[in-house]
Amino acid sequence: MAEVDVIPKIRCDNCGLTVQKERGLVSSAYRKPRLWGACKMEGGRSTDSYGGKARLDFADLCERCANVALDAAAAALEKARSEGFDGPTGAE
């Protein structure tokens, strides 16, 4: 019988792009592509819902979505810095 090599796939948590995983250079284990990223952020709001504004957790992001998430977070933080901060309560 012929031997079949099944290559696992990975899917972007944001846009749904699906690609084959890559083999590592040192080990033969599969891993996500080198240019893919992840995004995990926790806010100071007290909400319980997963995926709400209190927490973002994307374990697998394609290169495009990872770069967009990074740029958006950097822009939002820069805007918050320029608007100032009024103490630990975060009053605006």
Image (spheres, rainbow, N blue to C red):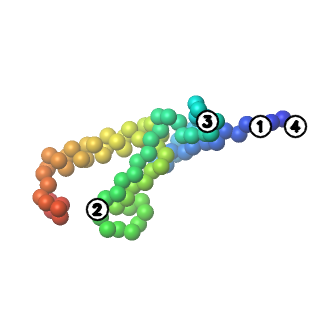
Give 89 or 47, whichever is nearer the viewer.
89
Q: Position of residue 71 (x, y in %)?
A: 32, 40
The amino acid type of the residue labelled 1 equals Val
52 vs 20: above or below = below
- The residue lying at 19 percent from left, 50 percent from top is 80
Q: Secondary structure at mark 1?
A: loop
Gap between marks 4 and 2 measured at Cα: 57 Å
Looking at marks 4 and 3 on the same chain, the residue that comes earlier in the sequence is marked by 4
As drawn, is 80 to the left or to the right of 49?
A: left
Q: Which residue in the protein does label 2 denote? A: 44
Secondary structure under tag 4 reads loop
Mark 1 sits on what residue?
4
Identify residue for label 3. 27
- From the image, tell me which residue sits under label 4: 1
Label annotation for residue 34: none
Q: CA distance from mark 4 to mark 3?
A: 27 Å
